[in-house]
Amino acid sequence: MKVAIIHFWLVGMRGGEKVLEALCRLFPQADIYTHVYAPESVSPLIRKHTVRTTFINSLPLARRWYQKYLPLMPLALEQLDLTGYDLVISSESGPAKGVLTDALTPHICYCHTPMRYLWDFYPQYLKSCGMISRLLFRLAAHPLRIWDVASANRVDHFVANSAHVAKRIAKHYRRESEVIHPPVDVTAFAPENGAFTQPGKDAPYLCYGHLVSYKRADLAVRAFSRSGRKLIVAGDGEERAALERVAGPSVRFAGRQSQQESVRLLRECRALIFPGEEDFGIVPVEAQAAGRPVIAYGRGGALETLREGETGLFFREQSVDALNDAVERFERMEDAFDPAKLAAHAATFAPEHFERAFMAVVDRVLTGSGPATDR
């Protein structure tokens, strides 16, 4: 079977690329199409595949400025020739699903989210832009939304990475979708000797992720600066400099981390702080796999990956007071969290569950029986 996988851009290894790796394992002969490709920034598994790019890859400084070329991406996708493929799979959170296929080629879209900056987080995105970028994006956003909805009709079957994203697909595209949670390499975070160790009461809390505005690391920094509790902020991004300016002495910035350091930080933290609204959120699952509880904002994918009082706690308002109240609640009951039970819950998101469920969808699509997403 000849398979094409369309992925928005390949400039790093984050959650979307971990899903792409799983698709590469399922379809080892598949060709990959993407807007921008930086081979040195992706895994050897992805590099084994034939990777073809749109014309965006040839534009000036595309690897750094790829998001600035967003208005050209619909045109770029429609220039791809997918003739002769038996199956097309798009991996969507940036423009990927808008490719053109013939009437007999099934197109399955694994949707991480409809583009946040066009829909749910559009006001927040505008606030984070400079004056000129804000003006240009206001002009571009409306026609991009029209194209985004129109291109959703080119998809035969939608698969959402969470029930939260399935609601967004229904809202913005008026399409049903089947939920399959993304794969998480939970074994990488398990203790080496099989026995969990409990960090002491002096262990720092951890906030880990890409430092961009919608992930709300600012909330964790301000809350822990006020309380004086120790917090490590791991990761890098455009918000880091601003966060460092408002951080108190109890907050330390660790920067970008290797896989080995990520594992160590998660194993040794008192709890993971997860203050943003995520589509799914892989880091909370990784923390549970390491035996550590999670204190999360109670919206989005966290509601599907955490169990209140068993693997973590929620705060219901994105405010300093609400987060600090949740931390105080956690400290009163933290001995009740069993690391082995946390790891067992995380194991339900292991890659084999994703691979089995996704192949079941592919089998139904190819045999014509189809999942519930059929129109």
Image (cartoon, rainbow, N blue to C red):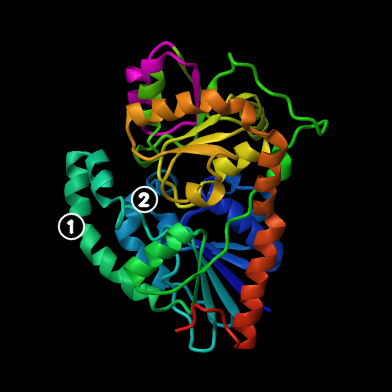
Left-right relation of 259 to 323 = right
Q: Is residue 292 or residue 15 the one in the foreground?
A: 292
Q: Is residue 342 or residue 329 the one in the foreground?
A: 329
- Range shown magenta: 226-249
In the image, residue 184 above or below residue 177: above
Magenta stretch holds residue 137? no
Q: Position of residue 105 (x, y in %)?
A: 54, 84
* Residue at image coords 69%, 23%: 198
Q: Name the residue under label 2.
A: 67
Q: Residues within 10 Å of mark 1 (few under 14, many from 20)?
A: few
Left-right relation of 205 to 290 = left
* Residue at image coords 42%, 78%: 154
* Residue at image coords 59%, 34%: 293
Magenta stretch holds residue 234? yes
In the image, residue 254 above or below residue 73: above
- CA separation, marks 1 and 2? 15 Å
| Secondary element type, mark 2 | helix
Mark 1 and mark 2 residues within 8 Å of each other at the beta carbon = no
Q: Residues within 10 Å of mark 2 (few under 14, many from 20)?
A: some
The numbered mark at residue 20 is: none
Q: Quadrant of the C terminus?
A: bottom left
- In the image, what residue type sits under mark 2? Gln
* Residue at image coords 63%, 68%: 358
Q: Is residue 13 or residue 108 the one in the foreground?
A: 108
Left-right relation of 37 to 135 = right
Q: Name the residue under label 1.
A: 139
Q: Position of residue 275 (x, y in %)?
A: 42, 36
Q: Where is residue 45 in the image (x, y as percent from the top left)?
A: 69, 53
In the image, residue 226 above or below residue 69: above
- In the image, what residue type sits under mark 1? Leu
- For marks 1 and 2 on the same chain, the one whose residue lies earlier in the sequence: 2
Q: Position of residue 13 (x, y in %)?
A: 57, 45
